Image (cartoon, grey):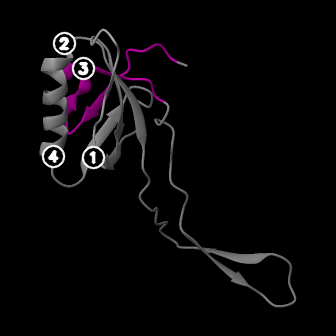
Amino acid sequence: MKEVGNVLTVGGVSSDTYKVKITGAGAYKAPAPTVTKKSVPGRNGDLVLRRSRPKYPNVRVTYPTLMMEDIDTWMPQWRDYLASLHGYVRIEDTFNPDEYRMGFLADDIDPEMATNLTLGIFDTVF
């Protein structure tokens, strides 16, 4: 696993602005192409038909996320920023610097707070 220090860029704004780091577990998830399978009587297996222009369904990508300083200040700002975005936005991560996704916040942000309240661990799901 890479060193914690990786960031997301969501809608052109780096998560580092809000003191948020990602660990990358969801960074490599990708959708499977939509295919049509036809059973042919008297033949083994299925005939697999792909569209000439592949169509990919939406997938949920979960980024395990850490906030390690001044959570009372930065958590509401990070949450409010993500909630303020409308529609699909460009999402980039430092694990795949040459790629980007189009997505939107798909789940609530519910941090688990460490006992000393200086560390917040939560998932950011697009």
Q: Residue at x 35, y 15 (%)?
A: 114
Residue 55 drawn at (x, y percent): 46, 66
Binning the other alpha carbons within 10 Å of mark 2 as few (below 14), some (14 to 19) or many (20 upward) gives: some
| Residue with the mark numbered 2 | 70
Q: Residue at x 14, y 36 (%)?
A: 81
Query: Residue 98, can we see it?
Result: no
| Residue with the mark numbered 4 | 85
Residue 113 drawn at (x, y percent): 32, 21
Query: SS of the residue at dot 2?
Result: loop
Query: SS of the residue at dot 1?
Result: loop
Q: Quadrant of the N terminus?
A: top right
| Residue with the mark numbered 1 | 105
Which marked residue is nearer to the observer: mark 3 or mark 2? 2
| Residue with the mark numbered 3 | 16
Occupied quadrant, residue 84: top left
The three-letter code of the residue at mark 1 reads: Leu
Q: Is 101 one of the magenta-colored residues?
A: no
Which marked residue is nearer to the observer: mark 2 or mark 4? 2
Image-based side of 15 in relation to 73, left or right: right
- Residues under labels 2 and 1: Cα distance? 23 Å
Q: Residue at x 16, y 21 (%)?
A: 74
The three-letter code of the residue at mark 3 reads: Asp
Query: SS of the residue at dot 3?
Result: helix
Residue 18 drawn at (x, y percent): 19, 22
The three-letter code of the residue at mark 4 reads: Leu
